[in-house]
Structure formats: C-alpha cells, structure tokens
Image: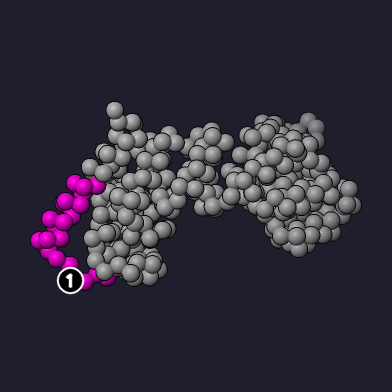
Amino acid sequence: MLTLKQRLLSALRAAASLHRLSLSTTAAATPPVGFLAEEYLVSSCGLKAAQARKVSKYLSHLRSPVKPDAVRAFLAGIGLAEADVAAAVASYPLLLSAKVDTTLIPRIGQLREIGLSPPQISRLIAVTPEVLFSPVKISRLAFYLSFLGSFDRVHSALNRSSYLLRSDLETVVRPNIAFLHQCGLTDDDIGKHFLMKSRMLLTQPQHLKEIAARAEELGVPRNSVMFKNVMPAIYSLNAGRLNAKLSFLKKVVGCSEAELGNLMRKMPTVVTRSESKIGRILEFLKVEVGLEPSYVLQRPAILGYSIEKRLMPRHCVLRILKAKGFLSKEIDFYTAVCPAEERGQMATEL
C-alpha cells in the first residue's frame, strides 16, 4: 500500500509529465532558433526590462527555453500565479534552471510533509524560492513554524529578512534563544522583538551578549521589562554611532549618565531618532511652549511625536482655550499631547 508521501510524489510526477508532454509537442512544432535569456525573462516571466538585464547573467548557461518552460509549467501546475513566479525568478533566477523531477518535486513533497498547504507553498516560493534547493532550509523552516506558531508569522519574518533560513540553528539560533531565556524573555518576546521586528536572533551569540552588556551599562538590567525594547534599539546602531547619539542626548538634554539611563529605560527608541529631529523638538518645546529640556528628560516619549502633526496643533489648541478662559486650571502639555489611552497603550507595549 502506497504511503501518503509516495502518493504525493506520484501525483506531482504525473503532473510534471503532462507539462513536459505539452512542452515537447510545442517545441517539436516550433524548434528554438536561439535563446536570449534577457528577452525570455521579459516576455515569458513578466520581469521588467531593468530586472531582466540584472539577472540574465545568471542564466547565460542556458541554450534553449526547454528547462525554464518546464519549471514555469510545473510552478503554474502547483498553483503559483504569474506574479509570484516573476517575483521568485527576480530574486533567485537559477530557479529557471532547476530539474523538475530531481529537485522541485522532492522539495515540494518535503514542504507538504511539514504541514504547508499548496497556497502557503506558493506564498513561500514567491519570497524565498531558494528553499526549493535546500533540504536543510526546509528543516529550518519547520523549526520556525513551531517556534513562531504560524505560517503567517514565518512568512512575515521572511519578508523582513531572507537570512532567516540561512542562519545555523545549532550554532547561532538555539544558543541565542537559550541566552535570551536566561535574560528572562519568553519565546513570544523573542519572536516579536528579536525576529519579527529585527533579525537580532540571527546575529552571532557573542555579539548578542555584547549588546546585552551595553544595555546593562545604560542602566537596563536583563530581567527588566524594558530589556526587550532596549536591545533592538542598540542593535540598530554600531558602537560608534550609538556612542555619538548618547553623547548628543546628554549634551542637548543636559543630563548625567544615570539620567540618560533612565531616559533609555523609558524610551529606548530615542536613539533611533535623528539628531536634527530631536534638536527641532527641543527647540520648539523651549521657544514656543516654554519647557526646558529637563521636562523632556522625565517624559521622553514626547520626542516620538511630529511637530507638525501633533505638537504644534495641540499647543495651538491649548493656547486658544487658555486665551478664551475655557481652562479652569493649567493643563500639563504632555497630558494634552499624549492622551491617557495612548499612554496606556505605550505602557503595555513597553
């Protein structure tokens, strides 16, 4: 009695045979007179001319459209739309030189074995077609499906970084997860902050530990609530750029090292803001609103708002209300800028 895997492979091979028969009939009727990869990519795969020029060099070994046609027919047969095929070929042109019987059919079978549906396989190939050439990457994919809990989350992570399936699980990913567990983070924390929002989980373990040590130097201990937010912010900057940003903040806000650490705990993403934006906000608060930098030191979230879209409009409303005598008492500017529901949401996210 045939197993499910054997039946699946048999069905895939039967479909591929039908595609080859159709292609061979067409080829016999109109034998190829030459193969121009760039032209083929545009006319048959739907790539733009600029894309075709860029990737055609990877197909210079092809002498006829027989193999690319077979690949395209196979991918169409398993449900890939033309736009998905075009996206896959643009990112990994060697896909068109794959062998249907010995490469594509076995890989599709393995993807089905780890629980992916045909529509999910189509979405996967569109963003990371190289998975069809590597059983190792399929095993890594199975790990992330379990770790992140759903295909949609894995697909989102792959959209952010194609390196997801390239990092070694045993020497990089698992040691990093173990270290972050020691720091008090849950799998959900790790997935959300270290994989979905950044690719910190894929960095070398020693580098991850250095970033954690830097966070502690800034006054954010490993088991604190803010640790998972500070780490990605530090990771986004190299050491020199981070030190320059911290020095700038100390200067313009006028704070000590300890106060800077307090600011970082309250709003770690402040280091990702440009110096010019921070400078403009501080100047606006001082000149227009009459607030000193020390005010911002206690309420750093205010640095995340736009002058034009939030700070200036709220300031104008307060000024009008005050001039007309509608305010029975002075309203704190930060309270007006950041309503209670937003402050509650920010606290939850942090």
Circle 1 packing at 10 Å, graded few (<14), some (14-19), many (20+), is few
Residue 289 visible within the image: no
Q: Residue most toward the front?
A: 1
Q: Quadrant of the N terminus?
A: top left
Q: Pointer 1: what residue?
A: 33
Residue 127 included in the magenta stretch of the image: no
Residue nearest the viewer, comparing 163 with 246: 163
Q: Residue at x 75, y 39 (%)?
A: 183
Quick one: SS at disc 1? loop
Q: Residue at x 21, y 47 (%)?
A: 17
Q: Position of residue 252 (x, y in %)?
A: 82, 57
Residue 113 visible within the image: yes
Q: Residue most toward the left?
A: 29
- Image: magenta residue range: 16-36
Instruction: Name the amino acid type tagged 1.
Output: Val
Residue 138, relative to residue 282: is it above or below?
above
Residue 340 appears left or right of 126 = right
Residue 62, by quadrant, is bottom left
